[in-house]
Amino acid sequence: MTTLALFKEYIWLVNTIHQAGSISLNEINQKWVRTEMSEGVEMARSTFNRHRIAIEEIFGIIIDCNRRNDYKYFIGNEDVLRDNSVQNWMLTTLSVGNVVSESLSLQNRILLENIPSGGDFLQLVIKAMRENHLVNLEYRRYGATASTQYSLAPYCVKLYRQRWYLLGRKNNGEFRIFSLDRVVDLSVSDDNFMIDKEFDANVFFSECFGIVIADPTETQRVVIRAYGDEPYYMQTLPIHHSQKVIAQTDNYTDFELYMRPTMDFSGYMLSRACKAKIIEPQWLADEIHDMHLAAVQMYEEDEEASC
């Protein structure tokens, strides 16, 4: 069996058990024989057990067995499949990849988003992270005529709005964010570093909206009032993990968040136009109000110039 075919079986097995919550091997086989992959043949227990081992080794997902409940199988470490986990991202990406690969006749009707970040640089960064090696980085900001050299400890990478970002720590302990699509050159150093044992990437970014960290804005309560269909979008795809509904009427829904409302968040709110507005804090409402006025003025100036 090819590696691709095995991966398809692994992904199908994890998704089937995860969706069921708890399921026996017999119930798994009832679903399995209805797939094209099975060719109508049940999955042998030995094959199933080999798949369990491989899934744990590759994805870090444990398929456990409850012997007190008719030997039913379940995901033993359910927390690794949270929305922003590597395992969940891998499974989702590979699952979609499987569907797309089986639908090449529809390739002109399946549209994907491009990620401009350099894949080679991402591989080098992950290699350095795995081996605890420093990276040497040549970086050029947008609009800059010259690039800058950095030597960094690669602490984590984050995918945000179709771009990969590297969180690096300088020799003086300062953390900096670098977009990989602005990296001119990157190499892995022979020098090692020791990552701070207390560092947790999820905790580090937990108060952020996106990837802006070099901003003095403090964490605070933010209330957004959403109108029309916007509450549905915000509920199905929360803009921050702290988001919760605090009020609801026929005309609008109020959402409360605790986060750092930095400039990238203001840009997001500006994009929502008349669909949502800031209720609290007042300084943020005023800031976005002024940004809207500046945009209107820009359009009016363009109209006057064309007359």
Image (cartoon, rainbow, N blue to C red):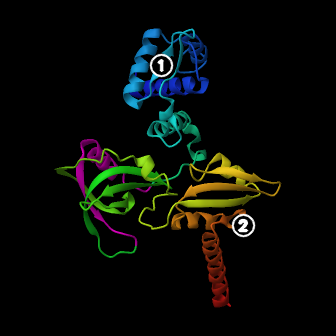
Dot 2 amino acid type: Cys
Q: Position of residue 153 (x, y in %)?
A: 27, 53
Dot 1 amino acid type: Asp
Q: How many marks?
A: 2
Tell me whether the residue at label 2 lies in contact with that at label 1, contact meaning CB atoms closer than 8 angstroms.
no
Q: Position of residue 227 (x, y in %)?
A: 75, 59
Name the residue located 71 percent from the left edge and 50 percent from the top edge: 232
The residue pinned by badge 2 equals 274
Q: Position of residue 246 (x, y in %)?
A: 71, 52
- Is any part of residue 101 visible from this angle? no
The residue pinned by badge 1 equals 64
Instruction: Specify the quadrant of the image occupied by residue 214.
Output: bottom left
Q: Is residue 38 above or below residue 163?
A: above
Q: Is residue 98 above or below residue 221?
A: above
What is the magenta range? Answer: 116-142
Counting residues from the start of the chain, the first of labels 2 and 1 encountered is 1
